[in-house]
Amino acid sequence: MEDFGNDGTQAKIGFCYDISGNRIKKSDLNDANAMSCPNTLVGVPAKDTSGRNQAYWSYDAFGKLRGESDPDLGVSFYTYNNFGDLISSTNAKGVTTTLSYDGIGRILTKSIPEGNIQYTYDSLSGSENALGKLARVEDGNQSKTFSYDKLGRVKKEIRTILATSSGNVLPTETQGPYITETRYDLLGRVTRIDYPEHPISHGRMRACYEYGSAGYISGISVQVNTNGILPGYCNKDIVENINYNEFGQTATVTLGNGIATSYSYDVKGRMIRLNSSGDVHGNTKVLQDAVYSFNPNNNITNISNTTTDFNTQYYYGYDGIGRLTNANGSYLGIAEGNLSRRFQQSFGYAKNGNLISKRIHDPSNGNITDEWSYQYTNHQVTNIDSSKSGADTFTLQYDANGNLTRQRDNVKDLTKRIQVDSQDRITQIQDGNNAILGSYWYDESGFRIRRSALEEKNNVFANVEILYPSKFYGLEFIESENVLTSVNNVYLNGVRIAAMNEAGALAYYLTDQVDSVSHVLDDEGNTLSQIQYQPYGETFVQRGDLDFSPKYNSQELDRESGFYFYNARYYDPGIARFTSADTIIDGEFDTQGWNRFSYVKGNPIGAKDPSGHDANAGIGIMMNSQCRGNAGCNSAGLNAVSEGAKKAVVGTAAVAATAATGYAAAAEVGSAALPSAIYLSSRLGSSNITNSLLNRLPQSQGAVANSVNATKEATKYGKIVPTGDLAMIEKEGLPKRGWPTIGKLDDLKKVNLNNPKEIVSTLYNKQLQSDPKYTEKFKGGATLLELTIPKNTTIRAAGITNKGPNGIPQYRVNGEIPKESIDYPGKIK
């Protein structure tokens, strides 16, 4: 039987099925040859090299997949136990992965050449409420222990990083443990995340999430403490407010630095305007004002961006199935003396999705100045010829599993030698002289926990170590300086919107329609970095600091390799291809979906790939309104872990889609609970999931969903300012060095807050006014004159929150904390 897909370019794919309905063959049908169906009893043939990208599958009498031959991944074989659980898989490199299970079908061990991965369930020291759940997972690089609340939701993850003793040995303190704690409301939405402590200074951040009456997230705030103890609530706004339209689309987002981004949509739900502006040092500054135009197929044809400092214009053209065929861009730097930059590119594609040509044009006349011609083996680009530089400008080599192992730039005389582990993850990159440029370590799910690279710092090359104890928290160790710094990442709808270091310095990220970072701002709205991109991710214009991590698609660029890390695999923006074969088919009936190396099916202007596994529409099409009321979509915008777990693949790094785009603990619970035979849904499509998998999947998905439920803690707070330092606040707008972070009052009676000799001064605050625990008297409804504070109350000044009247920063007050005493009037102990 053959199924044809006509996609506007006459590209077609065909399928064969056996008598039981199992798919046994897939082939491109882009030539005149007829498609033949194989004998299902003889197994699978060798890897196809005909250029038709033919894939084959064979099954046993029970419908279990026994073998597959893929044009990109090679030939693999599988065996099962009597219960239908996968117990071994052998890939095209001859690497065998074996699995063992307990009596109810949960994975106990996963054995790979690098060592064993151990899973522990039900009961373990340090794990709470784990009956029926994953308590611990451990491999040679790290270990994670999970605790749950009474509703079965992950409330704590404790990670220890063992990889710090490999390669360049790091200080012992960097092993951890790193504790991430999460609290939820009754709808399963995250209300609070306590980040890991700094291993030396013990500073710790808390992020708090608020929701509106419609169920959408309405604000994000944080608290930073220097001693690792986090009583009270959050007092520094990261996102002050979020408004939505009647369709649940984001209308405005106001950041803690006062910059507001507004989104406008047409009747089709497409974003047609993106504006970010606000007050910066008394002047209204427009940071981005992008207006979008579309063709009838919903592809973006023009982006016109007018700002205070620069203007950009982009024009795009497409073929019949939405693949980008031409792009023109111009940049005019108004603040840089009308600095002008322009580019013009065009692209050609094969019917199977391969990029076959990339042309560079002279923007002044359109003439081609260089044309790259791509040669392939199936979907793997092996050579790139240049009309300007000659044949074999680039040469590329792959292993049997479809991983790039060598890339040679003959024009620049540069070579990259790439080592991968048994799970197809890059572990080291060397230059042509075998000098190590970068080394990488991962946990059992593919989440990258350490990066070691040679980087330029202050005009000197130094070894830089990056640790990732969680998605939210990172550490940087510069060996030559013996300094360990931290960064706390804050997410909204799965996108990093801000980062804070242990000193409290903030960076805010403004992004475009595909979440590429266009601006990095400080807490006052000043621009720290500004960047524009060419279509497939190469840098067009960049100004300011280069060191901020998220860039194209909000992914991290490894400068030692030039690759972007897309969580499940790496992407090379220079040649516009992934460096390894995707383990998930992105659309089984789509002629472009079977190309395991292409980037977002050739439409980088309107699509993004947050996990490295599939193309998602950018906000030029729609926003994340589906998160409303969804227990798998928490307030931080983490992707639903149940969806990520459904795409888990044994023997690959595919599970990184959950760990890297969702909360790692919840992701691990999901991936371990799911039967390992889930790989069928990723390689073949959901139609080929076996019966034994279907029998277990609902319960497993339920366990994953439970991991993102929680309860909400009540909070009561007001705002205060130490009177003695009001002049300093008004002058500098910043807390004075040495101010107390915690003040505990013993028997504070009525305080005349208009008297500067008294201890504290406070400004009108609605939350404080409505709190029945406080007795208040107001003058004119605006100025608080007297305040009665109950005994044993703590006054906490943990950081600046939003500015109050006259631009004076305000502090929060938290009640009912154990008593201490006043050191002397005017100073809180």
Image (cartoon, rainbow, N blue to C red):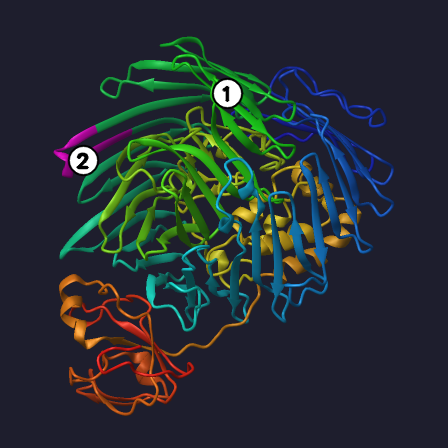
Q: CA distance from mark 2 to mark 1?
A: 42 Å
Q: Position of residue 376 (x, y in %)?
A: 55, 17
Residue 459 is marked as none
Percent of width and height locating residue 300 = 37, 37
- Seen at 26% across and 76% down, the residue is 720
304 is higher (above) or lower (below) than 705: above
Which part of the image, by quadrant, shows the C terminus? bottom left
Give the residue at mark 2.
Answer: 333
* Residue 125 relative to residue 21: left or right: left
Element marked by disc 1: loop
Q: Quadrant of residue 409?
A: top left
**Rendered view: 311 above or below 256:** above
Residue 305 in the image: above or below residue 54 = below
Q: Residue furthest top?
A: 390
Residue ID at (24%, 63%): 737
Classify 10 Å Cα crowding around label 2: few (below 14), some (14-19), many (20 and above).
some
Residue 338 within the magenta-colored segment of the rendering? yes
Give the residue number, with chain letter if any, for mark 1: 434
Closer to the camera, 479 or 443? 479
The amino acid beneath tag 2 is Gly
**What residue type is disc 1 on?**
Asn
The residue depicted at 51 percent of the width and 48 percent of the height is 172
Residue 105 in picture, x, y percent from top left:
79, 52
Q: Secondary structure at mark 2?
A: strand
Counting from the top left corner in percent of width and height, residue 535 is at 37, 31
Q: Which residues are magenta?
A: 329-340
Q: Residues within 10 Å of mark 1 (few under 14, many from 20)?
A: few
Query: Which quarter of the picture shows residue 335?
Result: top left
